[in-house]
Amino acid sequence: MDPISGLATPLTTQKTAPQESDGALWDAAKELEASFLSEMLKSAGIGKTPDSFGGGIGEDQFASFLRQEQARTMVDSGGIGLAQSLFEALKEQSDVSR
């Protein structure tokens, strides 16, 4: 199977590179994008158990883990740019509140 990273290119370039002090904020933004993409994959039917010859309830239980990891891989490969937007908004909010 081809890796997901070959399918998508980032839509935006990183405008503000996260500094080491912003690492937790950047990680949170990436995880939020991964959660969003995971829900989109679920809505698209990725990981849905086939009607015939499926793995049963066990496959249903673990399909969410597979989707989440696929979404994290997509984010690590550039994602859709949501993490960057979230990071910049969260960074701006944290700078204003200081």
Image: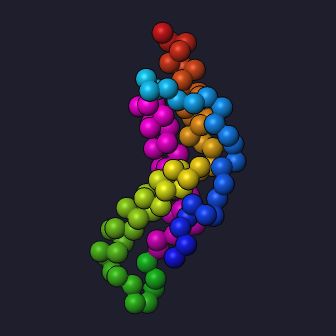
Considering every residue shown, the one lying at the far top of the view is 98
* Residue 46 image position (x, y, % from top left): 51, 69
Left or right of 67 on screen, residue 78: right
**Can residue 55 be seen here?**
yes
Toward which corner of the image does residue 65 lie, by quadrant? bottom left
Toward which corner of the image does residue 37 lie, by quadrant? bottom right
- Considering depth in this image, is 91 or 78 the residue closer to the camera? 78
**Can residue 36 be seen here?**
no
Q: What residue appears at the point 51 percent right and 63 percent down from the top-left corner?
A: 42
Q: Main secondary structure of the magenta part?
A: helix
Q: What residue appears at the point 52 percent right and 29 percent down from the top-left corner?
A: 18
Considering every residue shown, the one lying at the far left of the view is 58
* Residue 54 image position (x, y, % from top left): 39, 84
Left or right of 8 on screen, residue 73: left
- Considering depth in this image, is 24 or 66 the residue closer to the camera? 24
Q: What residue appears at the point 31 percent right and 76 percent down from the top-left corner?
A: 57
Q: Give above or below for 34 relative to 20.
A: below
The residues colored magenta run: 23-48
Number of numbered markers: 0
* Residue 9 image position (x, y, % from top left): 66, 54
* Residue 58 image position (x, y, % from top left): 29, 74
Q: What residue appears at the point 54 percent right and 20 percent down from the top-left corner?
A: 93
Left or right of 9 on screen, residue 40: left
Q: Is residue 50 magenta?
A: no
Colour scheme employed for the rendering of this structure? rainbow
